[in-house]
Amino acid sequence: MGLLRRLVWRTVRLLLDLIVVMVVFALIPGVPPHVTYNVYERLPPPLPLEGALARNTKLNIAERILDGRITGPESIAFRADDEIFVSLHGGKILRLWGPRFDHFKIVTSIGPGCDGPWQEKKCGRPLGLRFGPDGRLLVADAYLGLFAVDVDTGDKESLFNVTEEIDGAAPMLPDDLDVDKDGNIYWSDASSVSHLCDSMTEMMSDPSGRIIKFDPKTGTNTVLVRNVHFANGVQLSPDQDFLIFSETFKFRVLRYWLKGPKAGQSEVFVDRLPGFPDNIRPKEDGGYYISLVSYATERNRQLSAALSPLSFVRKLILRLMTVTKILFETANSIYPSVYIEKLAQKTLHLEPVTAMTIRETNLTIVVEVDADGKIVDSLQGDSGTIVLVSETQKVGENLFFGSPYNKYLGRLMLNPPTMEVEGKGVRMKTGDTNEDKGKTRDESPDELLQEEKKQVIEETQEKGAECDRNRSKDAELSRYSRRRDRDLECDLRLRDLDLWRLLLP
């Protein structure tokens, strides 16, 4: 009994000592991160998955484009029904075009290049994309700021110095943007206290996100909305009299009035969303697609509710995580290692948190609302084909789905072509658009197949020769840059060539 009593006492004493150390650590001034912590308001329960949010499987039939060949296609912009541009990890802007979007090339790199996504501070991380009135592609890079890119030449221009303070604080996380008819850019600074790779800091501390207006004529930025808990997707109304934006960590979308009697005021546009809202993009009927980058499980909600009133606990956890990251970075500076560098990059990143949610559920939701914020429908999937959707963009007869983490671009064909077999002929219908309605093509199956084989082989032979020439020029590029640039265009073409050669009689 004496031995057991001493063991219990030592265990209790160890726990008490640990608690004292943790309390002292949390109270010591000057320990990073240098943010404030207050009690959060308790969030209302999420809307139930019924009515317009009733479970469905519309996204289960979506397909993946460039599966395994790209990383993090966050946002999509387009200037024609058969041409889109995508922002990628590594600081790249990718162009895809053609009826099947099977032609692609890197347009430009926002940053100088790096060895991988774990060095995104160096190579940049382009997020939101829009085309401006002058035809240039506007890019919000999480680390390097706002850029205008000539997608035909690859030339890029930084619109302002992102290190300069805007109304007392330098932007730390430019996220999304939209542009009005006069060229004014409305953009979100998701956090003024943490970079993208440290987003856990914004999640567990007081809100610091902002909505900002950039006037290209004067080169000035004006803060419109403050204290947003991770300011995310931005979208102007069709009449440009208000803009709506996502407040991701509060599961809602807010509206800020630009004109009219409410000009300068903010209000809730849609609340109690069942997940974390990301980018917002317009629908043809005047409504909007609100992409939920992650479904908020019951465990997520309970943890958030438990930590909301416990500012001291959040402070302690965040300090421990920050010091851990500093230790990793110090170790990497002494003994450089890719593995330590990756650990440092992920310590305060949201990606591991999102990965845990995916292990629990594959449920993916895109909420459709009307012009007044009323939920009218939703796109959902649970097969895992399309997950972690950051943006939904309608281009022609396709819906494209971006993601900050996926290694593919999602696509859902809204009006896929159909095929009718009549005897030995094939009648292909190209869809029900006004221009093509009723058009058919009558050819034998063999003729159609041989024609396509011939065309693909000619293209891939030409591409193969070009790849061989380019690869000899890429010897001095890093492995990551080489794989993400020209190899992205080469490998699929060469694979197609080998496949069609096997299929030829």
Image (spheres, rainbow, N blue to C red):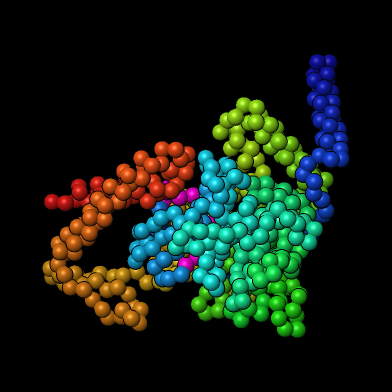
- Residue 263 can be seen in this image: yes
Q: Residue at x 87, y 40 (%)?
A: 29
Quick one: 221 or 212, which is closer to the camera? Answer: 221
- Say whether residue 68 is magenta: yes
Quick one: 18 or 228, which is closer to the camera? Answer: 228
The location of residue 7, given as percent across then percent down, is: 80, 20
Which of the 4 image quarters holds residue 183? bottom right
Q: Is residue 499 left or right of residue 479?
A: left
Q: What count of labels does the image hold?
A: 0
Compared to residue 485, the image places residue 211 above or below, namely below
Q: Residue at x 61, y 65 (%)?
A: 177
- Say whether residue 501 is magenta: no
Q: Residue at x 57, y 42 (%)?
A: 118
Q: Residue at x 39, y 57 (%)?
A: 104
Write down the region rendered in magenta: 67-78
Looking at this rendering, what residue extends furthest in the bottom direction? Answer: 261
Q: Is residue 301 left or right of residue 19?
A: left
